[in-house]
Image: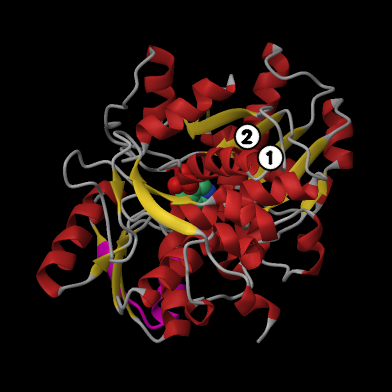
Amino acid sequence: MSARSQIRSHITHLECSLSGEPCGHEVPTRLNPKNGKPYLARYDLAKAAETLTKDSLAERESNMWRYREVMPVIDPSYIVTLGEGFTPLQHAERLGKHLGMKSLLIKDEGVNPTGSFKARGLSAAVSKAYELGEMKLTMPSAGNAAGAMAAYAAQAGMEAHVYMPKDAPMANQLECVAYGAELNLVDGFITDAGRISGEAAEKHGLFDVSTLKEPYRVEGKKTMGYEIVEQLGFEVPDVVIYPTGGGTGIVGIWKALDEMEQLGWIGSERPRMICVQAEGCSPLVDAYKKGEEFAEPFPNPKTLAAGMRVPAAVGDFLVIRAVRESGGTALTVTDDQMVESVRNMSAFEGIFPAPEGGATLSALELLLESGEVNRDERVVLLNTGSALKYLDVLGPALGF
Ligand SMILES: Cc1ncc(COP(=O)(O)O)c(C=O)c1O
């Protein structure tokens, strides 16, 4: 028996993220039918802590499945993986110096398979769907998630249907076709794509893996939180800056921190979680600023950062809650600021970030200026994807 197959998942059940109501994890599940809110996976963390120790990690595979005890797949033979995760947490020395900071770090998710952090969520969700016998998948996507789903579905021999706005980046459209998915371009926003994908699921018996409407994509994304803490020698940074569309990453990182406290890896300390959105699409920032718990849909969203062009999110209250509980904040940046930051992150660090990644640097600059972040704090920027997936959008913006 390989070491991998001796480590088991300690998933126990799903739990409604709003009401706390439990639900079994043995059958394919989506939203809580009573309130339309997401379920989150829960684990027996005391049991998990017996084998998922800090020392045990030294021997494990360098991808996100190293945290197997707190991942949802029970039989490891169903894990569909392209080696996603365990991405570099780069000490951004030159950029930090430019900003007068000592401890600036960039988690570079652009090196993931399919060029973005969406690989994590989709490796988890496709694996779990595979284990539960769902072989025909559908999803709405701003672009990167569709590419990731199509790649993992290809590896597992599953059928993949994707619905994305017709102005999604060319790379995302092309990769879906190359991976053998059925590509449907929608004349509208991701919310329209979501409605159409949902209808297709009903009509054709497909399993819809829209983020947070399906409980396991967030389990993949939470591994970013595990990795940041592990890569910092089991310390928690002061600030995490996250480019937010639907917000699954913030929800996941926040969940990981709670789990790691229960595993005994960290104490009650938490980073301030910073939610960055585009000025042209800021439903969560607006709700946060108004003191609301839920967000109103944002009319006519417009930004070149396709992943942040999400006018309404099913996990809105979870993102806003994480930001508030952490003592963080939410703010917007303009497309011009993002493009300038794409240039700076590239030229100072050799990381060519997606515009979403650029947004985190623009946000940091604003927060340093306002004094909400101090120059001596340890700050992590999440570069969620590679600029190589946005050449058609970024080329003209960079004057190329
Ligand atoms: C590169 C990139 N960054 C950020 C996001 C937003 O992610 P989340 O849904 O976790 O807010 C996306 C979503 O499509 C993305 O593709």
In the figure, 307 relative to 338: above or below? below
Report whether 34 appears left or right of 103.
left
Badge 2 element: strand
Residues at discs 1 and 2 in contact (Cβ within 8 Å): yes
Looking at the picture, which amino acid does disc 1 mark? Leu
Residue 300, given in percent of the width and then of the height, sits at 28, 35
Residue 19 x/y as whole percent: 29, 34
Q: Could you say where residue 141 lies in the image, as x and y percent from the top left?
A: 36, 57
Count the labels in the image.
2
Q: Which residue is mark 2?
A: 241
Residue appearing at x 51%, y 82% in the figure: 77
Question: Mark 2: which amino acid?
Answer: Ile
> Which residue range is magenta in the image?
170-185
Q: What residue is drawn where x is 50% and y is 29%?
A: 322
| Among the 4 quarters of the image, the one containing residue 263 | top right
263 or 225, which is in the foreground? 263
Report whether residue 163 is seen.
no
> Which residue is tagged 1?
381
Q: Please state if 378 lies on the left or on the right of 52 as rendered.
A: right
Pick the quarter of the image with the C terminus. bottom right
Toward the viewer: 100 or 11?
11
Q: Does 183 sit left or right of 170 as displayed? A: left
Residue 51 position in % (x across, y down): 68, 61
Label 1, residues with CA under 10 Å away: few <14, some 14-19, many ≥20 = many
Q: Is residue 94 left or right of residue 152?
A: right
- Is 395 situated above or below 297? below
Quadrant where the N terminus lies? bottom right
